Structure formats: C-alpha cells, structure tokens
Image (cartoon, rainbow, N blue to C red):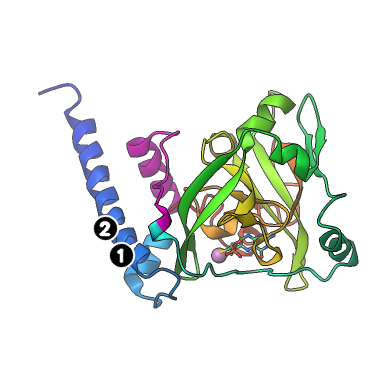
Amino acid sequence: MPRNEGSTSARSSRRSFLRGLGVATGTLALTGCDALSQAPWFRKILFFDEQVTRRVQRAILGQSDLAREYTEDDLSPAFRANGSTSIDDPDYQAMVANGFADWKLKLDGLVENPGEFSLADLRGMPSRTQITRHDCVEGWSCIGKWKGVQLSHLLEQANLKPDARYLVFHCADTLYGQALYYESIGLEDAFHPQTILAYEMNDETLTVPHGAPLRVRIERQLGYKMAKYIMRIEAVESFDHLYGGKGGFWEDRGYEWYGGI
Ligand SMILES: Nc1nc2c(c(=O)[nH]1)N[C@H]1C(S)=C(S)[C@@H](COP(=O)(O)O)O[C@H]1N2
Ligand SMILES: [Mo]
C-alpha cells in the first residue's frame, strides 16, 4: 500500500467538497446583488464549521492562492451598502466636508516603526486593483472593483515585532448605538496579496456608504470582516482585551472569527 494513500484520499474528498462549494458560489454570482432566500443549502455553506472551511481552504488552495477575480463585464450594476452607511459623529462629518484632507491612518501596536499615513501618502504607494465578489452573511453578493495599497506593503515598512499575531482594524462608526465597529485578521490574511486598503471603488473615490476614506478588502472572507471607515490598524498579540474579546463587532455577537468563504 502506498505510504500516502490515506492522505491522498483525504485530499480528494476535500477537493470534491471544494468543487461543491465552487458550484454553489457560481450560482450566487449569477444572482448579482439580489437578496438570496434563506435557503438551507446557502446557510449551510455559510455556517459550515469554520475550522473545516479554513482547513479545506488552506489544504487545497494553499495560503497565498488568490480568490477568484472577475472582469469589468461581471460588475454588479449597483453595489449594495450594508451595516453602517453614514456616520453622525461631528468629527467624521468635518472630515467628509474637507475631503479627508486631515485624516490620517494610524498604524501602531506591536510594530517597530509606528506610522501615520494621509490619503495622499497611501495613493502614492504601489497600488493593486481587483474585481471580486463580496459575499454578505445575510445572503447577498455583489461584484465590485477595488483599488488600494496592499496591507503587506505597509506592514513591511512598519516591521512587526515577533509577538504580533493579529491586525486589528479600528473603525469610526458605532453600529446600532452599541459599540465601535472593529475587526481583526491573522497574519496569513494580512500578508495575502489580495488584502488591500481600498480608497477607490468602481474607479471612483470610495464613498461614505462604502467606508470612506479607507476600507479593507480581504477576499477569502465574508463581508463583515471587511472593515469600513478605518482609522487605526493595531498589531496585537491577542484581542482578549478588546471589547467583547472575540476579535470583532459581529464576532462579539456570535459570528465566527475566521468567516471564510
Ligand atoms: N466599519 C464598518 N465596517 C463594516 C460594516 C459596518 O457596519 N461598519 N459592515 C460589514 C458588513 S456586514 C458588510 S456586508 C460590508 C458591507 O460593505 P459595503 O457597504 O461596501 O457593501 O461591510 C462590513 N464592514
Ligand atoms: Mo455583511
């Protein structure tokens, strides 16, 4: 018996699982921005045990494989905005009024070189443009075009300290009057080539409903991971001490932390 027979068949069963997922999400793409029904098959995919999803994704795709990218023809005619779509806070309103001229992204925490970056600084860095599908856990998806700077570019300059394990995105909005929105990702996704800090959507400056002036795109994960209105990125060893301790606004309310698709 070949030494690796067991693992080969395990691999092929994971592969057929992933093929199944591909078929299902292909169907999603056709629906564009339409709300999907709460069909049990759809919910089953979204809520598939996250550890399994993550292991399958890593085993089959490897850590730096790319999420599918689409063409201009595939762009959704309108990209739905979700969660916070504006912010009442007077400080934020003042920033909108002057085109975010005084806004600066802070990058700090467990880094050797903390920094602050204006929009002009970010726009002056090498950029990546990608057309991808956004899947919201509520059952809709939209295809949009995003342009921004790779998070890895900033992290390479900031130089993470050895104990840094996660990046936390601190946002400007308070959702449902409850708490500031925040999210976190691991280093694998932080350094992934499609993880970008986007300042443009569909060839236009990012609008307020979609998270102006800056939102993150993390293309192998669900919509709620993609923090909008980012003010600060903090490198941490753990997020136990932040808010509810689960690593994100929705995670603190029961959603999975990884949220893979
Ligand atoms: N700061 C912040 N980021 C957020 C949210 C939010 O309410 N506040 N909602 C999340 C959810 S659930 C989704 S689906 C996407 C929606 O992004 P969009 O408005 O560009 O469609 O943003 C995510 N990021
Ligand atoms: Mo979402």
Q: Nearer the viewer, residue 225 or 78?
A: 78
Question: Image quarter for residue 197?
Answer: top right
Q: Which residue is mark 1?
A: 27
Answer yes or no: do the residues labelled 1 and 2 have beta carbons within 8 Å?
A: yes
Question: Image quarter for residue 191?
Answer: top right
Q: Nearer the viewer, residue 257 or 143?
A: 143
C-alpha gap between disc 1 and disc 2 = 6 Å
Residue pictured at 51% horizontal, 70% vertical:
78
Tell me the kind of residue under disc 1. Thr
Q: Which residue is mark 2?
A: 23
Q: Dot 2: within a 10 Å radius of its alpha carbon, few (fewer than 14), some, or many (20 or more) residues? A: few
Q: Secondary structure at mark 2?
A: helix
Q: Nearer the viewer, residue 160 or 32?
A: 32
Q: Name the quadrant where ligand 2 sits.
A: bottom right
Q: Nearer the viewer, residue 195 or 221?
A: 195
Numbered range of the magenta stretch: 47-72
Is residue 141 at least partly visible in the picture? Answer: yes
Residue pictured at 76% horizontal, 45% vertical:
119
Q: Secondary structure at mark 1?
A: helix
- State left or right for residue 57 relative to residue 235: left
Residue pictured at 40% horizontal, 75% vertical:
36
Tell me the kind of residue under disc 2. Val
Give above or below for 45 relative to 186: below
Q: Quadrant of the N terminus?
A: top left
Where's residue 240, x and y in %?
Answer: 71, 46
Where's residue 22, x and y in %?
Answer: 30, 54
